[in-house]
Amino acid sequence: QPGADPGGQHPAGGGGLVTNSGAAANLFISQPNNSFVTYGGAIGGAINLYKTSVSGANPSNLTLTAPSTYTGSTTIQGGVLILQDSATLASTTYNLNGGRMQSENRTGSLSGIANRIPTSSVLNMRTGVYLELGRPGQDVFDTVATVNFLQGYNELRVDAASSAAASLNVSSLNVTSGSQVFFNTGFGTLGNAGTNPTISFDNFDAGTMTINGVIPWAV
């Protein structure tokens, strides 16, 4: 069963399994404002996961600490979904609608894992944030297939840790008119040489995504 964990670090209580062997079903996890829940079990089967949060100044955190194999989509409708310790997801469609997805590899996590979500994943972002946090002494390189910036002000952020590099590679990038993107790092060293965070793209059409050589949608 899920258990409250004010520190947001490790499971409170046991694990368990939430699964569905029938037709695809929706699993809603709704949290009040300023709540912190850690689930040490697994989610499997034909499930679409919806993590929702009451809006406010202190959004809720849901931390997963074990591998989950559910095959449906993942939607974060407010608050933060954190993948930590041994947590990985098999889901390949992620809808970040006013919410944040966080790959947590810092020393508070029991392990650092690259590609906690599949490299074939698609991120659909509507005022969403995708955050990759590196691990001291261990390089963490992540890849996703597609990022679609569909609406609002969005953020891709990568933080490297001491004596290690961290990167996010996006195979295909698509920006809807009117949306904006903030490429960010917590240390102000994004793209610098050495052990610094990087964000790279395999498919970037400068002819259609720039105006006079300027990227108008990027901050």
Image: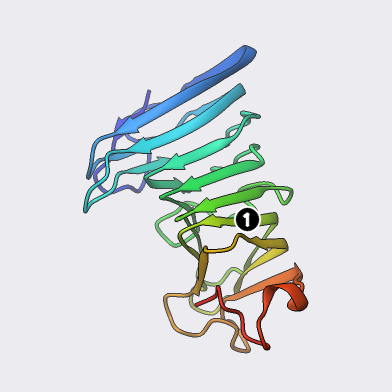
Which image quadrant is residue 89 in?
Answer: top right
Provide residue 204's location: percent of width, then percent of height.
Answer: 75, 71
Q: Residues within 10 Å of mark 1 (few under 14, many from 20)?
A: some
User: Residue 167 vs residue 37: left or right?
Assistant: right
Q: Which residue is mark 1?
A: 148
Q: Nearer the viewer, residue 111 or 176?
A: 176
Answer yes or no: is residue 21 visible: yes
Provide residue 123's location: percent of width, then percent of height.
Answer: 61, 50
Protein image colouring? rainbow
- SS of the residue under disc 1: strand
Provide residue 219's location: percent of width, then percent of height.
Answer: 49, 77
Answer yes or no: is residue 85 visible: no
Please give the name of the residue rendered at 56% of the width and 28% of the height, measured from the top-left corner.
48
Answer above or below: position of 72 versus 215.
above
Provide residue 97's location: percent of width, then percent of height.
Answer: 46, 46
Q: Name the residue type under label 1.
A: Asn
Q: Nearer the viewer, residue 24 or 137?
A: 24
Q: Quadrant of the N terminus?
A: top left
Please give the name of the residue rendered at 62% of the width and 85% of the height, measured from the top-left corner.
214
Answer above or below: position of 131 versus 196.
above
Answer above or below: position of 22 versus 218.
above
